[in-house]
Image (tube, rainbow, N blue to C red):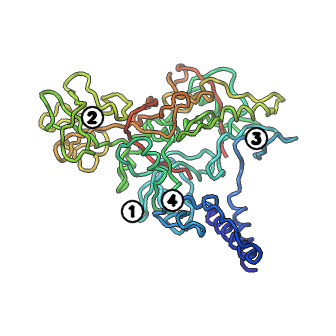
Amino acid sequence: MKKILYLSFLTSVSMLSYSALAEEITCTASPDCETLGYTQSECPKGGIRCPFDKSKMFCVSGFGGEDFRFKNNIYQNQVVFSDGSTGTYYDPTKDAIGIITYVHPNAQNNHGLIMSLEQPSVQSRDFAIKYCANYTTKGTKVGDWHLADIGEISTMQNGDTIDNSTQFTTLNTLLSTIPGAQALGVSFSYYYSRQCKDSNAYLWVDCDVSGITCPNGSYNNYFTSSPSYPTNYLNIGGYANNWYPLIDSSSGSWYKYRADYNPAPGCVNVYGATSYAYLLTSGYPFYYSSSYWSASDNPSGNQPYVADLHQINQITTSNAQKGHFRCVAIF
Amino acid sequence: MKIIFTIIILFSFWSGHGATAAEVGDIYFSDKTFASTMQSGKQAIGVVYWVSPNKDFGYIMSLDEPTTTMNVFNANVYCLEYYTEGTLAGDWKLPQRIELIRMGKYKVNGTVTDNYTAMNNILSKVTKADGNKATTLGNKSYVANSTWPYCFNPYSGVISGGGGNTQASGTKYSVRCITAF
């Protein structure tokens, strides 16, 4: 609201100046639209075009142009709704937009960090930064969200504080109660294809490739004692903790590498309990990683900091090509 | 005339709405006020080291730190018991990682913010209630409130960690307590 009023004021003043000086001055340089706050080229949720350059816009939020703000005291792990209210549980009469992962410690409980409900597919870090910079939800606007920095992503990690070693797990439990929300860490971009096996070798297949093909390159024989994974993908944790080569139900011998989290869409739980393996409905196992990009770099090493949210002791740097990410917003 | 009146009203509303409490580098006093320089008759108790995008809330670091290093367990207790003129035990805390990394040099989206130098420039000009100068940040590791004892070097911006988190064990690190507004 403050920005809109500011824009209205500046625009009005500019227009007044024009009319007042029209008789005396024949030429005046137009105000710079970006300086006035019209910094966007398009606004999915609606916006105001700069009167001096129609290609520049100021985006307003999705409900009446109000800036998002919390309407009540907030607490960690509450569900956030588009109208600024929060609650311990999902409210089907409202639109959920995120979960509070951190409450600013000023005793007023009115500011904090929101984690988005959406889990985009694994991407490069540059893509992740741009994606989050343009991310919006009902009730928020472009610019409200950003790729979590290493401190912010830490608020989603097990071991977030000295007395909270289950934050990641808690968040995923909560996410499972919100329709449309996607679990942290679940990845179904990769699975191994029995179609591609050659003797004991199993090929990692990128789901971005349409259909099940067998491209040349890294294959994985996890019948050996040290299974590997595609090294170009962000995975900083241990194999057994992050990549779950799930086998079909008939053999069952690999169910010990189990996915403890909610199945991704298209997956079914073959054992009927959340602590057992999930298989893709097509019959192919999926793999899991809880490693996430951050927007932070090591200032000394120029590599991005990354965090494995499932493990309390995994923050490092990585030059991997693709990884998970999550958008956050501070209000 | 109506337009001018409306503009004046709008501007008044805009300028008075969501008043800024503080800027990074402001000194925090025991009467819960802020100023960019030391104020006669007031006791400084902290320095603002991070403010929100709208500058309506932020973090304040203490002006001193314990002379000995501590493991994360004892550091947590120390900060929970820390107090100053105008504040009570419980008003301060051991910073979590989200709070600690903003205390020093950090690089986000390719942009380096050297809060280490900025904070030390301020801290070196602040006098504590006992008449001594505030303690500047050091090129050393400060511990965060986390299950796995992560630490942060504000000079280099490097995050590392390790050690236990019980009262009797664990790697010892430097400690700087914070509060918030």
Image quadrant where residue A12 sits? bottom right
Circle on res. A141: 4
In x, y percent, where is residue B50? 65, 42
Both labels 1 and 2 in a single chain: yes
Q: What residue lies at 44% left-to-right and 40% top-to-bottom?
A: A167
Q: Chain of mark 3?
A: B
- Is A150 on the left-hand or right-hand side of A231? right
What's the amino acid at mark 1?
Answer: Pro
The residues bearing labels 3 and 4 have C-alpha atoms spaced at a distance of: 34 Å
In x, y percent, where is residue A302? 51, 31
The residues bearing labels 3 and 1 have C-alpha atoms spaced at a distance of: 46 Å
- Element marked by disc 3: strand
Image vertical order of residue B110 relative to residue A313, above or below: below
Q: Chain of mark 4?
A: A
Circle on res. A244: 2
Between label 3 and label 1, give the one nearer the viewer.
3
Between label 4 and label 1, give the one nearer the viewer.
4
Between label 1 and label 2, give the one nearer the viewer.
2
Task: Identify the residue position indicated by label 3 in the image.
Answer: B27
Both labels 4 and 1 in a single chain: yes
What's the amino acid at mark 3?
Answer: Ile
The residues bearing labels 4 and 1 have C-alpha atoms spaced at a distance of: 22 Å
Both labels 2 and 3 in a single chain: no
Circle 1 residues within 10 Å: few <14, some 14–19, many ≥20: few
Task: Identify the residue position indicated by label 1 in the image.
Answer: A92
- Is B110 on the left-hand or right-hand side of A285? right
Question: How many numbered discs sit on the rendered protein?
Answer: 4
- Element marked by disc 4: loop
Q: Chain of mark 2?
A: A
